[in-house]
Amino acid sequence: MKRYAELAPSQRTIMTPGPVEVDPRVLRALSYPILGQFDPEFTSYMNDTMEMLRSLFRTANHWAFPVDGTSRSGIEAVLTSLIEPGDKVLIPIYGRFGNLLYEIAERVGAEVVYIEKEWGSVFDPGEVISAIHREKPALVLMVHGETSTGRMQPLAEIGKVCRELGILFVVDAVATIGGVPVNTDEWFIDAVIGGTQKCLSVPSGMAPMTYNDIAAAKLNARKTIERGLRTTADSASASCTVRRPVIRSNYLDLSQLQDYWSPARLNHHTEMTSMLYALREGLRLVLEEGLEARFARHRLHESALVAGLEAMGLTLYGDPSCKLPVVTCIAIPESIDGDSVRSMLLNRFGIEIASSFGSLKGKIWRIGTMGYSCRQQNVLQLLGALEAVLIRHGAGIHTGAGLQAALDVYDQT
Ligand SMILES: *Cc1c(COP(=O)(O)O)cnc(C)c1O
């Protein structure tokens, strides 16, 4: 019989835009005993999690809970539940994750219209607002932080116009939540999805999200149970005539999920006990640190990293005025093999940075400074290792300058 070695994953320094390193307290939480999903001890952890998510998203919304699955499942749950087939949806796209919103919206039967911005920049809010007036959509879907290009879209003005016109405003804040302010209520966002494995530094596998009463009203109007659909959520309705599902997913039907996260605790799927522990501990860490302090920490390590890279003589990619603070994109120098540099960083130094997608493939590296990975030791190790690897690859860089510039940033604070 084939024998398999015991699991022994290497300790890595992960400087990608996710997944990132996880705080040891969160890893410990993952090893705690399992509780049943209706055990009052467990449901009190669920309630704590809802409360902490409201603080994280800076919202007074009643509904704030995680969808079980990666961030994409949260996005898909919101779009599947809030878009009715035939709804006109406007998607301003400025990177890969805008395309994801497009794909999901189209799959759930939306009539999608989009505007597009060249990768490396974002929209002037006025451009989106004129498209809204022109197209009169039922929903506007936007990405807050585009990890693919390292850009961040200002949202407040767009949200305000959507609210005035009765348009639902849905935001993918997967990359920004916990690292950069996401002001759900102040920016008039009706539904917003975050991610665990990025700035929250929890493993991948849950999608924290929140939606307001306006979104809930649309959702509840589509509620499967009330339409007499045969459903496992309510055994009494099992004798009802089977009708066509209104929300075309069972797993991602927010109207059913919210019934489990409500005091009624209507059964849906089996809650992911261990992931809920991990998320709860991750949120506790965020709130202990304090949101403002956490945002400032992300800014500090970004500045040290950027100072180091520029002092080395490397060029950053994209419009600096809309740089996403938690992702730094570097133009790969002429005649340097980007993948070879990344492999050497990983194999010799145990440091991981990211490549890129689509038209940017082979042109930029992406470095994340997110969550628990966003710390001085990691930034300094990366700059030192990157310098050595670039010299090894024959790149013309200012030897010795990078680390000193980063140290200067740290010494000034
Ligand atoms: C990472 C990311 C996603 C996808 O998250 P998964 O957890 O891989 O499903 C979606 N949107 C943005 C902006 C991201 O950065």
Image (cartoon, rainbow, N blue to C red):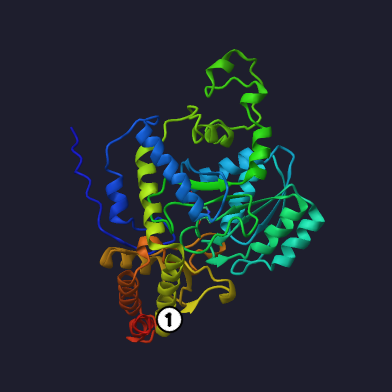
Residue at left 39%, top 41%? 45
The percent coordinates of residue 182 (x first, y second) are 54, 60
Observer-nearest of 293 and 244:
293
- The x, y position of residue 123, in whole percent, is 67, 66
Number of dots carrying numbers: 1
Q: Position of residue 326 (x, y in %)?
A: 47, 66
Query: 247 or 259, which lies in front?
Result: 259
Q: Is residue 249 visible?
A: yes
| Quadrant in the rendering for residue 218 | top right
Amino acid carrying label 1: it is Ala
**Which residue lies at the image location 55% right of the left edge and 61% below the top edge?**
146
Q: Relative to 367, is 9 above or below? A: above
Q: Is residue 234 toward the left or the right of residue 223 in the image?
A: left
Query: In which quadrant will I find the N terminus?
Result: top left
| Res 79 quadrant in image | top right
The residue sitting at the top extreme is 239
Q: Compare residues 362 and 15 and report the one nearer the observer.
A: 15
> Where is residue 7 drawn, in percent x and y?
23, 46
Q: Residue at x 78, y 62 (%)?
A: 130
Image point 49% across, 36% down: which residue? 261
Specify whether residue 244 is in view: no
- Tag 1 secondary structure: helix
Badge 1, how many Cα within 10 Å: few under 14, some, many 20+? many
* Above or below: residue 240 compared with residue 393: above
Q: Quadrant of the C terminus?
A: bottom left
- Report the residue marked by disc 1: 307
Q: Is mark 1 within 8 Å of ligand 1?
A: no
Please determine whether, in this image, residue 101 is positioned above or below residue 39.
Answer: below
